[in-house]
Image (cartoon, rainbow, N blue to C red):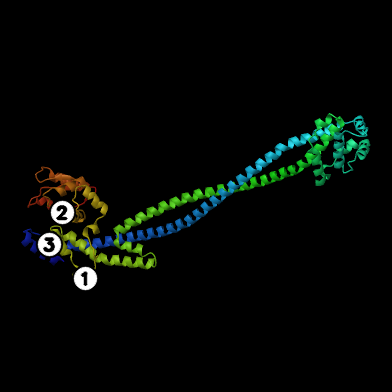
Amino acid sequence: MHQSVEQVSERMKLELRRHNYVTPNNYLELVSGYKKLLTEKHSEVGEQVGKLRSGLFKIDDTQEKVKAMSVELEEAKKQVAQFTKECEEYLSHILQQQEEAANQQKSLPGHHLSLTTSSQALESLNKKDLTEMKSYDRPPALVETVMQAVMTLLGKSPSWADAKKELGDTNFIKTLVNFDKNRITDQVLKKIGTFCRQKDFQPETVGRVSLAAKSLCMWVRAMEVQEGVEPKRAQLNAAKAQLADKQAALSDSQNKLREVGERLEELKRQYGEKEVMRESLRKKSEEMEVKLDRAAKLVTGLAGEKIRWEERGLEKDIHFLVGDCLLAAAFLSYMGPFLSSYRDELLNIQTVEIPCSPTFSFAAFLSKPTAVRDWNIQGLPSDAFSTENGVIITRGNRCPLIIDPQGQALKWIKNMEGLKVIEFGMADYLQVLENAIQFGNPVLLQNVQEELDPSLNPVLNKSLTRRLHDHT
């Protein structure tokens, strides 16, 4: 490699009349730089591959968790929809039952009042009133109809002769007041309904003929109404019981719905966190893949034999480091004076079978895209040749001598370093240089001619002495 540089330097001298001095110091710098780069890149590749493996594992783990939570989330949504539907059905049933219960409740007071009024009317009857009715040999039609209805309820013959005997019974009123309404059969109730539906079978109408018959008419109608009340009362009780059941079921469903809703919100929160985590890990993984071409193969090979592919990719990267580090160290030591065409020719070592990356790029190997972007912002041209020169300046072991007729490098270095600029013509340039070395500040010496001040040789050769508290 050293000999190749000497040969190309001679050719460049003939073609471009530009001298390049190749000294043993270049070779020593190549050896030391190679050892340093190889150690650095071994550590860097190992660290990056370790980070990539960890990131890929976390991505796989997160994706599995997200899948499981997605299934759980869908199940929770189904449960919410089911409970919501049940609650709507329960509410519909409850409204229906409440309406029915309200209707039944409305009808109870009137029926109760009718029964109470008829009982009071019976108790107001006295023996004189009954004797008046019993004295009829041929009673008025309304009186006879009322007694027929009374006798039918009592389960006796509705003839007037039997009715007169019943009126003569001293316990007649008591029998009516204490009458057991549950004894009324459907057949009797049907007959009583026939009497009650007659147009003139009304207490007010009967009262014009006989006050005693009026009270008995009220009692008959009350019995007919009360018999209709009992089924309604039973329906009311059943409706209330059913309403209570529905309310209990609704409360239970609402509790379940609330629990599922809370669980759903928690799942959504966790799901969102996992999605953010997964997306963050994915982006980090993509950045690593851009930095490590070899590491990209690890990601694509996860499907079947993840460990085998990782080990194989790592071995391949380490195998290439031998040639890549040699090329990079040689570039730093020798390539500064050469143009792009000469650099490309010298880098072509594939024929000597030194293992290196097929698409080796000096700038990409020793710099990061973010750093190159910052250099471009600070004034360094974005072409490949300028980028390579920027890497040589920042990574080289020797102080670089820059040929910069357009001042591009001067602008870039000033923006990048914020350094002190000195010239040979300045009276105190050595004092400024000494202070910069003492405090570790960068210095740019511009307008350098063919000859250098010998006082700069110790600085350029890095023959410096470190002092601590006035002790060498």
Q: Residues within 10 Å of mark 1 (few under 14, many from 20)?
A: few
Which of 314/30 is in front?
314
Q: Quadrant of residue 110?
A: top right
Q: Secondary structure at mark 3?
A: loop
Q: Residues within 10 Å of mark 2 (few under 14, many from 20)?
A: few
Where is 110 relative to 419, above or below?
Answer: above
Question: Who's the residue at 35% across and 55% down the image?
Answer: 284
Of pointers 3 and 1, the one earlier in the residue sequence? 3
Of pointers 2 and 1, the one earlier in the residue sequence? 1
Left or right side of 445 for 360: right
Residue that label 2 marks = 400
Where is 291 relative to 219, above or below?
Answer: below
Question: Who's the residue at 47% across and 55% down the image?
Answer: 70
Q: Secondary structure at mark 2?
A: loop
Mark 2 vs mark 3, foreground winner is 2
Residue 3 percent coordinates (x, y): 13, 67
Residue 262 percent coordinates (x, y): 53, 48
Separation (CA) of disc 2 from disc 3: 16 Å
Mark 2 vs mark 1, foreground winner is 1
Marks 2 and 1 close (CB-CB < 8 Å): no
Residue that label 1 marks = 353
Question: Who's the residue at 15% across and 64% down the image?
Answer: 345
Residue 158 percent coordinates (x, y): 88, 41
Residue that label 3 marks = 23
Marks 2 and 3 close (CB-CB < 8 Å): no
Q: Quadrant of residue 24?
A: bottom left
Mark 3 vs mark 1, foreground winner is 1
Residue 270 percent coordinates (x, y): 47, 51
Q: Residues within 10 Å of mark 3 (few under 14, many from 20)?
A: few
Which of 393/139 is in front?
139
Which of 469/33 is in front?
33
Left or right side of 43 for 122: right
